[in-house]
Image (tube, grey):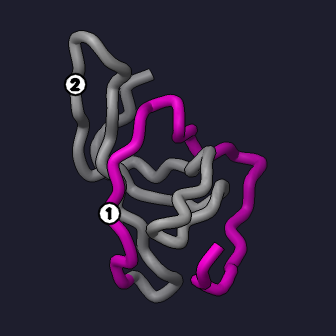
Amino acid sequence: MKYELFTEVVLLKDIPEKKLKKGDVATIVEYHKSDTDETGYSLEVFNAVGDTIAVVTVAESEIEALKESEVFSVRSLEAI
């Protein structure tokens, strides 16, 4: 599935070096097409008040679309 730029997606894995956890919501800011490897995306992650806390690049298999049945929650940004 090709996601559109600025779409919100959910992380499917922890990214400890950026203090991100599976289930965190991120915004797609760049698409990385690959002829040989899996498609990738650069994601921007924001805190609850809208400040950028991380920019990461992930494979398409490491994200998924938000679902209608999901709700947002808040967690403290701390080392994992």
Residue 38: x and y in percent read 37, 21
Amino acid carrying mark 1 in the image: Val
Q: Please name the residue shown 52% across and 83% down the image.
A: 48
- Residue drawn at point x = 68 percent, y = 67 percent: 72
Decide which of 66, 35 is in the foreground and name it: 35
Residue 8 placement (x, y as % from top left): 46, 52
Identity of the amino acid at label 2? Lys
Q: Which mark is residue 33?
A: 2
Q: Is residue 65 depicted above or below 78 in this figure?
A: above
Q: Nearer the viewer, residue 67 or 52?
A: 52
Magenta run includes residue 30: no
From the viewer's perspective, tell me whether residue 10 is left or right of residue 53: right
Tell whether 78 sits left or right of 49: right
| Mark drawn on residue 74 | none
Which numbered disc covers residue 55? 1
x, y (%) of residue 56?
Answer: 35, 56
Above/below status of 9 relative to 79: above
Q: Which residues are magenta?
A: 51-80
Quarter of the figure with the C terminus: bottom right
- Dot 2 alpha-carbon crowd within 10 angstroms: few under 14, some 14 to 19, many 20 or more: few
Say what secondary structure mark 1 lies in. Answer: strand
Q: Quadrant of the N terminus?
A: top left
Q: Quadrant of residue 20?
A: bottom right
Residue shown at 23%/33% (left/top)? 32
Residue reaching furthest right? 69
**Which structural element holds mark 2?**
loop
